[in-house]
Image: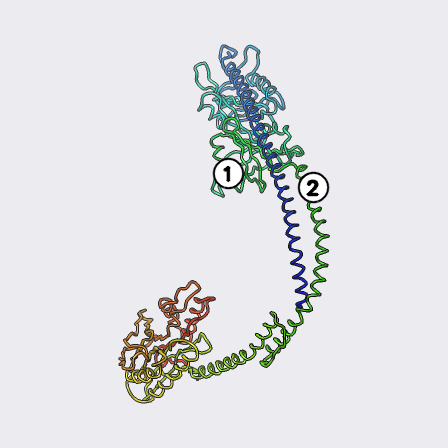
Amino acid sequence: MKFRWKLLILFMLISIVPVVGLRSFGIHNVHLMADALTRQIRQAHDDHTRMLLEVLTDGYSRMLASVRQQVELALDFQVLALQRSLSCPMPGGSTAGGLPAGGAGTDGSKPGAAVSLHGRGGACLVAAADAGAVLPFDHARGRTWPAFMESVSRAVKRQLGKLVVRQYTALNNGICSVYPCDANLPRRFDARRQVWYRTALAAKGVVWTPAFRDAASGLWVTAAAAAVYDGRRKPAGVASIVVSLENLADSAAAWKLPAGSRMLIVRPAGRRKQGRAGARVLVDVPVAETATRPAASGRSGAHWLTSTDQMQFKSMLRDFAGRISRIREMPVEGRLCFLAYGPLPGEAGDFVFIIPRNASGRSFTRVQTLIDRRVRRVEYFTAGFLVLLILLAVVLALGFSRTVTKPLEALAAASRRLAGGDFETRVAIKSNDEFGQMGRVFNEVGPQLRVHAQVQQSLAVAREIQQSLLPDAAPQVAGLDIEGATLYSDETGGDLLDYLCVGEKAMAQLCVVVGDVSGHGISSAILMATVRAALRLRASSSGPLAEIVTDINRQFACDVEKSCQFMTLFLARINRTHGWIQWVRAGHEPGVLYDPQSDTLHILKGGGLPLGICKETEFEAFKRDIRSGQIILISTDGVLEARNPAGEFFGRQRLYAVLRRCARQSAREIVREIFEAVGHFRGARPQEDDITLVVVKVLEDSDAPDRLA
């Protein structure tokens, strides 16, 4: 994009930003006002909902208390009637009559069969398989005991209505009167095995059972039961009234609540798969103003009440356990809702009212309409003003760009020529302003770039020369697998790697030298080349290793006396024929001799100052036996001092770990693995020092690898 268009955009931004800021400030204030109104409406709605839930919970709890009182009064009536029937005399002076010994019914039915006495919907007489006792008889009215109990059950049914699912009047001899009798009644039924029977016999007074699913109707129910005693105050049976939880919930459907409201009856229980406590939904009834209840609500498989707010949910479960009524606000099925809950009679469970937390739709619509009107007014006002500013900015930018873009275009054209290698390029800008200063600075850049290009060319030549000084490949020595490599951190470096006196005097032996000149750059590279030449010249003459290094140090110290540079050196002679290694260490990192068979590391130490420190230094050679399978590792400090982004050093332990892991591989593969490990450890951090590495594996003569020259 040309500068004049950029300048045009700049003018537009300068002129528009203040207006945009004012516009944003106004719109922001409108939104603040709308947010305040929305919060007030939502708070009022929440307060109203909480108040509604308090009234609803209190009213429903009162209704439950009334239902409990009615059921218990009806149960007392049923118990008194059963006790009176037990005290009635039977024909012939006996106090009981009915089933003969052997357990057959009066109509010849088999034990355990349900006998309908008064047709469909009447009471049923059910005898357990072991029933062999007799039945009571209402002598005063000439009625059988089942007929008498049916009249009592009908009276209870008229009083309680749909709340009653079934009434049981069970004797401890295995005979039971069931009302009403329908086709779903189990053919094999023993009342003494029912939970309400056992619970009532173990307690005094009226007891309420936990919620259970009625086998005949499929509804979730709870039962109120009480024991019946004979004249000797011994248990003679149990009277029970089974109450429908679904019909208890239906009584709340008459209260028209906000959309999405529901009434649940839940039972705290453990969830086996999840291994934690939960609340199982037994009945789920919509109580919203516009909701329609499903035809079979509460009769399908029960589900679980869940919430993503585990803290609130666990507190609610503790309230269920403590039979505490409370109102909470927490998410249910992905929606934030108000929950009001309380206990049902006995241990039947708890009721929960759920109302979604949302404000009145009409109130929000009015607030939104007000916001839209205010925002449109601000937008219309600022839009016209912005159009005028844009037109003015265009005119000013076009007029001003002529005085600015012309010198910039001249600088751009000259810069392209300079980038193409024309270092003689100049610009002629005569003004005394900033553009004139830019022109004068530009004219000074060309000569400096020419000098820089010449330096870069010289560095490239120096790099080529130094690379040519490094060995093209490791030498071939019988019984030795040799590999070495150098990786410079700059164009040139000060690390030295060379192989000397290979196979002299018809013996399988090798001299390897690894050195590191202090510093980086061309000066270090020149000193490295000087030492390399001196070593090659001196090593061609006879003499022990210590004498060679001493002579080299004397000459090198004279060369670097004024520059204060020095060089570390590790010179090793490996004789495969006689099985020994001899080395001289001049301040360099010690070499390593690793024996995979015994998994031992021998550090090739030895005293000696770096070369160039003192020309009078006398060096000492050290010697050690070697055998097949051992590995000799010589490196510069660039390997050990490589650092990762956290500043940690690679260190010897990581180096030794790689050496142990790759001990069975060839020397070339070991060198590659070490370089890869250092690079992976360093990560994105740049290489700070030159890295040189030599690996020599001692092999059997027959195992010497074939190498390409």
Q: Where does the image place residue 513, in percent across and percent down from the top left? A: 35, 80
Q: In terms of sequence position, does the residue under pointer 1 or pointer 2 come before the other?
A: 1
Q: Where does the image place residue 19, in percent across and percent down from the top left? A: 66, 53
Q: Where does the image place residue 225, in percent across and percent down from the top left? A: 50, 23
> Looking at the image, is 113 positioned above or below residue 464?
above
Which residue reaches farthest front?
432
Q: Amino acid at mark 2?
A: Thr
| Callout 1 crowding tier (Cα within 10 Å): few <14, some 14–19, many ≥20 | some
> Looking at the image, is 306 positioned above or below residue 402?
above
> Looking at the image, is 86 positioned above or below residue 369?
above
Residue 194 seen in the current view: no
Determine the residue positioned at 62% across, 38% down.
358
Secondary structure found at label 1 = helix
Work out whether residue 275 or residue 386 is closer to the camera in this orientation and state it: 386
Question: Quarter of the image containing the C terminus?
Answer: bottom left
Work out whether residue 384 or residue 221 is closer to the camera in this orientation and state it: 384
Q: Amino acid at mark 1?
A: Gln
Marks 1/2: CA–CA distance? 36 Å
Q: Where does the image place residue 538, in percent across and percent down from the top left? A: 33, 87
Q: In terms of image quadrants, where is residue 695?
A: bottom left
Q: Pointer 1: what residue?
A: 312
Determine the residue positioned at 45% across, 23% down.
201
The label number, if any, that marks residue 134 in the structure image: none
| Callout 2 crowding tier (Cα within 10 Å): few <14, some 14–19, many ≥20 | few
Work out whether residue 588 or residue 15 is closer to the camera in this orientation and state it: 15
Q: Pointer 2: what residue?
A: 369
Q: Is residue 378 left or right of residue 154?
A: right
